[in-house]
Image (cartoon, grey):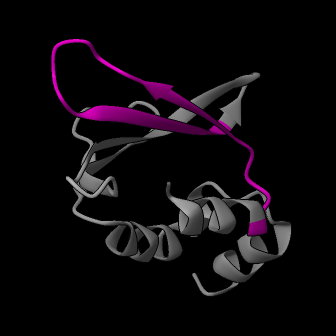
């Protein structure tokens, strides 16, 4: 799940950790992908609520992006919209020194 997003994070050198959470009460499954280390802990996370169709395929219901210290998380309907947002705001969490220099040059 979120294969394109994981490839994007790996290409930009961002460490991440994944885990599955299966709540007992609701039928949806929850997949959490934490990224962006700060002081040894992952501070940002993607929360994917998904279920299974009658054929057994994964169906993503909602993707929530919660950044460190954010009160109102961003919600996306699918992974494509999430990747568009990540590409637009990559300078915030990528540790690439060259991209930071280019960004500050144009200010």
Q: Position of residue 26 (x, y in %)?
A: 16, 22
Number of marks in the image?
A: 0
> In which image quadrant can residue 8 be found?
bottom right
> Magenta span has 17?
yes
Residue 89 sits above or below residue 22 on the image: below
Judge by depth and name the residue closer to the eye, 9 or 99. Answer: 9
Q: Position of residue 15 (x, y in %)?
A: 75, 45
Residue 87 sits above or below residue 32 on the image: below
> In which image quadrant can residue 12 be found?
bottom right
Judge by depth and name the residue closer to the eye, 38 or 63. Answer: 63
Left/right of residue 57 with respect to residue 17 in the rendered view: left
Give the residue displayed 83% in from the left and 66% down from the top: 97
Is the C terminus in the top left, top right, bottom left or bottom right quadrant?
bottom right
Furthest toward the bottom, the residue is: 106
Give the residue displayed 75% in from the left and 61% down from the top: 10
Furthest toward the left, the residue is: 26
Left/right of residue 35 with respect to residue 21 in the rendered view: right
Q: Position of residue 50 (x, y in %)?
A: 29, 45
> Magenta span has 8?
no
Furthest toward the right, the residue is: 97
Furthest toward the front, the residue is: 55
> In which image quadrant can residue 78 be found?
bottom left
Judge by depth and name the residue closer to the eye, 57 or 62. Answer: 57
Judge by depth and name the residue closer to the eye, 28 or 40. Answer: 28
Give the residue displayed 56% in from the left and 69% down from the top: 4
Residue range (magenta): 11-36
Residue 102 sits above or below residue 15 on the image: below
């Amino acid at each position: 799940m979120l294969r394109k997003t994981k490839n994007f994070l790996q290409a930009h050198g961002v460490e991440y950790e994944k885990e599955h959470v299966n709540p007992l009460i609701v039928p949806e499954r929850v997949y959490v992908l934490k990224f962006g280390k700060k002081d040894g802990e992952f501070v940002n996370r993607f929360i994917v609520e998904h279920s299974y169709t009658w054929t057994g395929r994964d169906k993503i219901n909602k993707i929530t992006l919660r950044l460190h210290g954010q009160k109102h998380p961003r919600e996306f309907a699918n992974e494509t919209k999430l990747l568009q947002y990540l590409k637009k705001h990559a300078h915030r969490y990528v540790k690439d020194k060259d991209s930071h220099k280019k960004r500050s040059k144009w200010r």
